Image (spheres, helix red, strand yellow):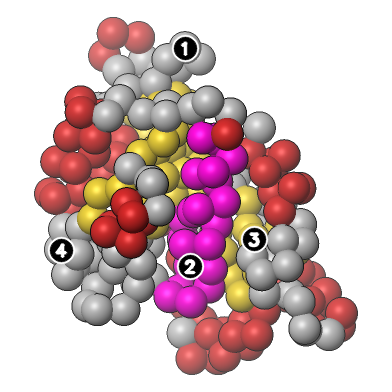
């Protein structure tokens, strides 16, 4: 069930279940904005990580990135750093299970050493972003907002529903916004079918986008404001 983070004065915030799409808010002043990208490997997480990062850098914000992929497949921190991004990497494990302590320490270190306005986390495609969120909350780090961006890709949507339905739906179940990616080259009927399926399950915006053609990217960035 989605959660809200509620202020409790000097005692700090606490998390409880809520029947509405969640947006975690620790304070209205100060603190970093956190985005967690959820989705299977190949769904387009890294593309939109870069999109969000450049958006905030162009706005004069300080951005830090944490990436986590298992094995040799996936984006790595050195690649992002070579493109000028401030990136930290947690390889060879999943930050929502085996690397929870490493995530805890990394968040604290990033806050202390970089103190970003915006912190973007790209977990492994096998992670549940809500567990990543809960670990970040547990660090007690000064956070203004935490939002989960769920990403699904149209070409493989039916395959994931058939083969990994329970995990697939759980992975995006607590998203604040869902990006329906790689719609270019797909039939309007198929795209509409994906949108209809998501809207029946989740009461959050679902936007059709394309990391390749940039369709819908402006609407997505506007939705972050």
Q: Position of residue 163 (x, y in %)?
A: 48, 91
Q: Is residue 132 left or right of residue 148?
A: left
Circle 3 residues within 10 Å: few <14, some 14–19, many ≥20: many
**Earlier sequence position, callout 2 versus callout 1:** 1
Q: Is residue 195 left or right of residue 28?
A: right
Q: Residue at x 72, y 39 (%)?
A: 222
Viewer-side label of 3, 4? 3
**Earlier sequence position, callout 2 versus callout 3:** 2
**Earlier sequence position, callout 4 versus callout 1:** 1
Residue nearest the observer in this picture, 52 or 131 = 52
The label number, if any, that marks residue 179 in the structure image: 3
Q: Residue at x 33, y 61 (%)?
A: 79
Magenta-drawn segment: 37-57
Magenta stretch secondary structure, dominant: helix
Residue nearest the observer in this picture, 63 or 156 = 63
The answer to whether marks 3 and 4 mark residues whose Cβ atoms lie closer than 8 Å is no
Real-space Cα separation, disc 4 to disc 2, in angstroms: 18 Å
Q: Residue tagged by mark 1? A: 29
Assess whether residue 55 is covered by the magenta stretch.
yes
Q: Position of residue 40 (x, y in %)?
A: 45, 74
Q: Residue tagged by mark 4? A: 98
Real-space Cα separation, disc 1 to disc 3, in angstroms: 28 Å
Q: Residue tagged by mark 2? A: 39
Q: Position of residue 176 (x, y in %)?
A: 58, 47
Name the outermost residue toward the top: 10
**Earlier sequence position, callout 4 versus callout 2:** 2
Real-space Cα separation, disc 3 to disc 4, in angstroms: 27 Å
**Earlier sequence position, callout 1 versus callout 3:** 1
Q: Secondary structure at mark 4?
A: loop
Q: Secondary structure at mark 3?
A: strand
């Amino acid at each position: 069930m989605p959660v809200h983070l509620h202020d409790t004065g000097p005692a700090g915030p606490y998390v409880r279940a809520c029947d509405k799409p969640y947006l975690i808010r620790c304070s209205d002043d100060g603190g970093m904005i956190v985005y967690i990208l959820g989705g299977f490997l190949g769904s387009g997480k890294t593309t939109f990580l870069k999109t969000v990062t450049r958006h905030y850098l162009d706005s004069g914000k300080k951005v830090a990135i944490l990436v986590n992929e298992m094995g040799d497949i996936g984006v790595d921190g050195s690649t992002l750093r070579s493109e000028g991004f401030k990136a930290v990497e947690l390889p060879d494990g999943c930050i929502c299970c085996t690397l929870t302590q490493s995530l805890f320490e990394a968040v604290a270190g990033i806050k202390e050493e970089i103190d970003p306005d915006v912190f973007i986390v790209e977990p492994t495609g096998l992670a549940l972003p809500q567990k990543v969120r809960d670990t970040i909350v547990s660090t007690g780090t000064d956070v203004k907002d935490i939002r989960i961006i769920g990403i699904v890709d149209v070409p493989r949507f039916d395959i994931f529903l058939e083969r990994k339905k329970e995990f697939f739906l759980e992975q995006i179940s607590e998203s604040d916004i869902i990006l329906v990616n790689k719609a270019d080259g797909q039939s309007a009927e198929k795209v509409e079918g994906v949108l209809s399926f998501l809207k029946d399950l989740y009461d959050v915006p679902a936007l059709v986008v394309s990391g390749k053609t940039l369709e819908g990217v402006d609407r997505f960035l506007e939705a972050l404001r």
